[in-house]
Amino acid sequence: MSLPDAVHALFAAPNFAHLATLGRDGAPYSTPIWADVRDGRVVFFARADSAHGRNMARDPRVALSVVDLEDPYRAARLRGRAHVLDLGPGRDAFVHAMAHKYTSRPYADPIADTVTVYAVEASATSAVGYSDVYAHRPGGPA
């Protein structure tokens, strides 16, 4: 399934995404991640030995959501299966490019051998926008 333009745009921009995986007991596990789009798939990296890395190795079904940092009433979500994306020697360049996208700097930590790049084949997507109804003004009177 190809990503609709609104979903593609939100994951391609430097917006933080949330990755939900399934734990050993079937309970959801959610963590914020950096994400991007490559060849019509959402891509990200994680350590294979992290909780979400172990969860994806056991069960590749995932859900991702993203909120527009500039307009938090625009969001997208997708469900699909995460697959390891073998970039070979390009893996480190991918990690540094992701860090630069989000921080304007290279990745600050040494890139561990367990860092793995994943691509998600979407099986369902949706995008929502409520900017025409709501304005983000936190802390105002109720």
Image (spheres, grey):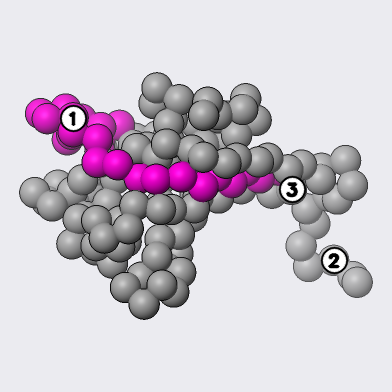
Q: Please name the residue shown 26% across and 60% down the image.
A: 58
Picture coordinates of residue 31 (x, y %)?
Answer: 42, 62
Instruction: Give the CA distance from mark 1 to mark 3.
Output: 34 Å
Residue type at the position of mark 2? Gly
- Residue 51 in sight from this viewpoint: yes
Residue 125 versus residue 47: which sits nearer the camera?
Answer: 125
Q: Please name the residue shown 46% across and 45% down the image.
A: 80
Determine the secondary structure under disc 3.
Answer: loop
Residue underneath mark 1: 87
Residue 49 versus residue 34: which sits nearer the camera?
Answer: 49
Instruction: Give the CA distance from mark 3 to mark 2.
Output: 17 Å
- Quadrant in the picture for residue 22: bottom left
**From the viewer's perspective, is the residue at label 3 or at label 2 nearer?**
3
Disc number at residue 73?
3
Determine the secondary structure under disc 2.
Answer: loop
Please state the extent of the stretch shown in magenta in the rendering. 74-97
Residue 103 versus residue 13: which sits nearer the camera?
Answer: 13
